[in-house]
Image (cartoon, grey):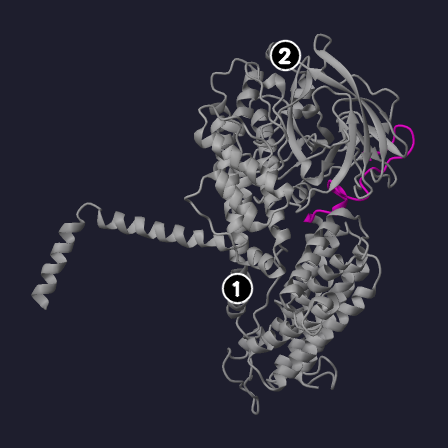
Amino acid sequence: MSGRTRLALCAYAATLLATGALLPLVDGVGWLLQAALVLGVQSGVGALARRVPLARSLTIACQALVTLLLLTVLFARDHALFGVVPGPEAVMRLGELLVAGGEDVGTYAIPAPLTDGIRLMVIGGVVLIGLVVDALAVSFRSAAPAGLPLLALYSVAAGLSGGGAGWLWFLLAACGYLLLLLAEGRDRLSQWGRVFSGASRSSGGLTDGLAGAGGGSSPVRTGRRIGVLALGIALVVPLALPTLDSGLLGGDGPGTGKGSGGGTISAVNPLVSLQNNLNQPENREVMTYRSNIQDPQSLYLRILALDEFNGSEWRSSTRRLTDVPNRLPQPTGLGRDVSVTEVRTNISASRSYQQTYLPLPYPASEVRIDGRWRYEPEGRTLVGDDGQTTRGAQYEVSSLVVEPTAEQLAAAGPPSQSLSQEYTRVPESLPSVVAETAEKVTEGSANAYEQAVKLQDWFASDGGFTYDTSVASGTGSSAIARFLRDKEGFCVHFSFSMAAMARTLGIPSRVAVGFTPGTVKANGATSVGLRDAHAWPELYFEGVGWTRFEPTPSRGSAPEYTRPQVPTDDASDPAQPSADTSAAPSTAPSADDSCPPQLRQEGGCGPSQEPGAALPTDRGTPAGTVLLLILGAVLVLVLPLAPLLWRTRTRNRRLGSGGRTPSDAAARTLAAWQEVIDTAWDHGIAPDESLTPRKAAARIVRLGRLDTTAAEAVHRIASAVEQVLYAPGPRPASGLTEDAPAVRAGLQASADRGARLRATLLPRSSVRVVWAVADRRTALAERWVNRPGHGRWTARLRRLARQHG
């Protein structure tokens, strides 16, 4: 058996052994057999291509092509040409399955059912890892870097399963990687002949020629060290990865107590799921409720509070759990002078919503629910015990509507020393710019209440911030400083930054995570969807208690007590999602195989001093070349998607701009209209700037063959644009960020598959990028020509040219 064939078999085995770590994530093992089959064919095609021989790049291309054909046969056979060739319909089918798989991952707890979308994601991910491992270890003869994708495969599986991958799968993945290293070492050193001192201790074995009289050779010891370091990283990396059971759609949670007064609540961080929920393509319903509250926009459903800031993240403190009392105690700090009304809310959770923490209006005074639930007094939350979740739960909640006046908040006295010490603590790593900005924004405030209102208004309208869910989520000190600098983010950034700044001012603060009030349906019930997930700060005022503020623009509603002069009527307006994901595995070790240490000691890296020793025929590809090739492959994959990515980000910016001032409302209206124009352009309806908004809307309805819902949405946006452009006092328009997606859905419904694919992957409106670049270039050229002294230098150059010519 040749060295390359042995390497290919070891690469195949190593990938399969590491794939075993994914078994705890989904039900069934049938997908593993399919993945093994596709991997085997992929590896066989590579072996045949190397025997021809083909260039390395062509070998990898052949493997990728055959893999795509096999995935098409498995998942899109009915949409492919001749059942094999992936045409436009097959590509769209695969894309739809990937989107569905992403939704299923966010819906089901581990182990998830093996839906077609999840099966494509798992098998596709495994064969992609297998292709990378085969390319690095076999095509480029660099087995050590091949540990990176194997490490990523195991670490992600272990992190998502919360340790469910188990020691068995860890050991199997480790053995596969070490086997790959040893096979590469034997293949590489066999080309040198016996160049080391002493005779071989074994003959014909795997380590034949690798050990001398003095014990294990340096290459073997180096391989062992690499293996040990890689395994150590594989142990540490899963500890840093978030698990699915702690998010807004998680499974079993941390409630572990049993019996009266026992148990604790572990610290959790639901922010990974929160951003994923905001970016869902469909606002899937997670619960409905009915309430007798007079102001529905103030009924936020709160899950838990994050009250500990350690510099790297905000998290919930470890608290003691008790049995749920019949009547919850009086909220901390609430005085008798504050107006309080008790309301009742009946909530019904969806079967797809599986969360350990029970969403409740704050502050709840009585909860009637069946099942095993525990009570955490400090955060006033209910936590499922012994596997209890919200799935399909139906419960009734009595809660207090606390309505303090601005005067009561302004006159609030100092909090207790213990509460102030706990909830104003900030880490030493917090950049000084946070406190400096807080002092600057609240300059001239007479009390803590005025400081809090100024902070809220600065984030919501006065500070120039933009709402954008595509920004990477982060709650640590550096993330807050970056947010204050870039002024782009979503509710996580706004709430955590305001809470941190309030703490630097001495105001006790924490962050609540839950849902905004939702949308009222025709039957009178209110629907809460995934994109209603939200985070907001809670600040403490003695005599009132923990008080909600709303710094996030275009989300939720500003509380009445923060608007003492002119109350704001600002309904919930979920933002349009954009695709973005950012998770990267930790760096694994790499090895330098170009010159073994023992060979250096025997005379450097030149020819062997021992008679008959042969020079190596292949020393492997340098690490720099491998990295450049990987970078090139990434560029080849990303560049075709550049128009799609640009269009998605542009849509998100237009429909997610923030602020509550009249100028902000006008900007949102014009941005929504521009989005409708470009969406129609993407579907083949070129813009006509000579038409009025009303005539342009009629043209889009006619040429796009829109249904009634989409047509009404177009005309509503056009009417809002006419108000902005022509009315002396424009009436504020609401719901535009929902009308624009409705128009897009109508255009897609009336278009054929080819037009939809063209509009998605190659949108015509992306030519605006080229126009912007051309305009920028023209402006720079004019600035260069018109700069001071340009004419003098030009005349001098012309004189020099005439003298020498």
| Quadrant including the C terminus | bottom left
Asked whether residue 519 appears in the rendered view, the answer is yes
Mark 2 residue type: Thr
Asked whether residue 484 appears in the rendered view, the answer is no
Residue 546 percent coordinates (x, y): 68, 21
Above-or-below relation of 245 to 584: above
Residue 258 percent coordinates (x, y): 90, 34
Horizontal side of residue 743 vs 358, given as left or right: left
Seen from this angle, which residue lies furthest right? 259
Seen from this angle, which residue lies furthest left? 803
Seen from this angle, which residue lies furthest bottom? 612
Magenta residues: mostly which secondary structure?
loop
Q: Does label 2 or label 1 sit earlier along the sequence?
A: 2
Numbered tag placed on residue 46 in the rendering: none
Above-or-below relation of 342 to 679: above
The residue lying toward the viewer, choosing from 117 and 36, is 117
**In the picture, residue 550 is in which quadrant?**
top right
Magenta highlight on residue 256: yes
Numbered tag placed on residue 631 in the rendering: 1
Q: Which residues are magenta?
A: 240-264
The residue lying toward the viewer, choosing from 539 and 29, is 29
**How busy is the neighbourhood of tag 2: few (under 14 within 10 Å), some, or many (20 plus)?**
some
Q: Residue at x 70, y 28 (%)?
A: 300
Residue 115 percent coordinates (x, y): 79, 57
The residue lying toward the viewer, choosing from 692 and 458, is 692
Mark 1 residue type: Leu
- Where does label 2 land, which residue? 405
User: In the structure shown, which secondary structural element does the residue marked by tag 2 occupy?
Assistant: loop
